[in-house]
Image (cartoon, helix red, strand yellow):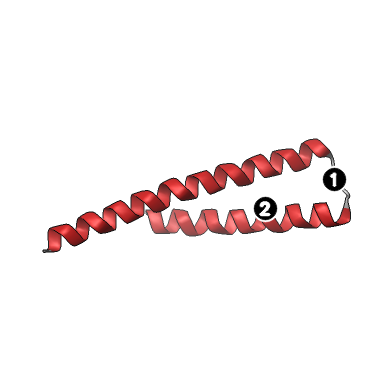
Amino acid sequence: MDISTQIKFLEKEHASLNKKIDGMEKTGVFKDEQLSEMKRKRLQIKEQLVILRKIQFEENYERLNWDE
């Protein structure tokens, strides 16, 4: 799986978790442990996205420099 595909996949996962977390918080129907675990997972995904976007940027930048 290339970086762009990984980024898109993780963005969808992150959006899905956001939606679930927002719904749980709005209804107030959740276990604290469950909500905490989902928030941890969301943060991990966000951290992975930051790393992958940095790698993608660096690869694109290197490609541009080699083309000159």
Question: Percent x, y for residue 37?
Answer: 71, 38
**Residue 65 falls left or right of residue 9:** left
**Residue 5 falls left or right of residue 10:** left
| In-front residue for pair 5/28 | 28
State the residue at coordinates (81%, 52%): 24
**Residue 33 falls left or right of residue 15:** right
| Residue 1 can be seen, yes or no | no
State the residue at coordinates (73%, 39%): 36
Classify mark 1: residues with Cα within 10 Å, few (<14), some (14-19) or many (20+). few
Circles 2, 1 touching at the beta carbon (< 8 Å) = no
| Residue 42 can be seen, yes or no | yes
Q: Secondary structure at mark 1?
A: loop
Q: Amino acid at mark 2?
A: Leu
Q: Residue furthest bottom?
A: 68
- Residue 39: numbered disc: none
Q: Secondary structure at mark 2?
A: helix
Q: Quadrant of residue 65?
A: bottom left
Question: Percent x, y for residue 16?
Answer: 66, 57
Quadrant for the C terminus in the image: bottom left
Question: Percent x, y for residue 66?
Answer: 14, 58
The residue identified by callout 2 is 17
State the residue at coordinates (74%, 55%): 20
Earlier along the polypeptide chain: callout 2 or callout 1? Answer: 2
The residue identified by callout 1 is 30
Q: How many marks?
A: 2
Q: CA distance from mark 2 to mark 1?
A: 14 Å
State the residue at coordinates (53%, 53%): 10
Classify mark 2: residues with Cα within 10 Å, few (<14), some (14-19) or many (20+). some
Q: Amino acid at mark 1?
A: Phe
**Residue 36 falls left or right of residue 8:** right
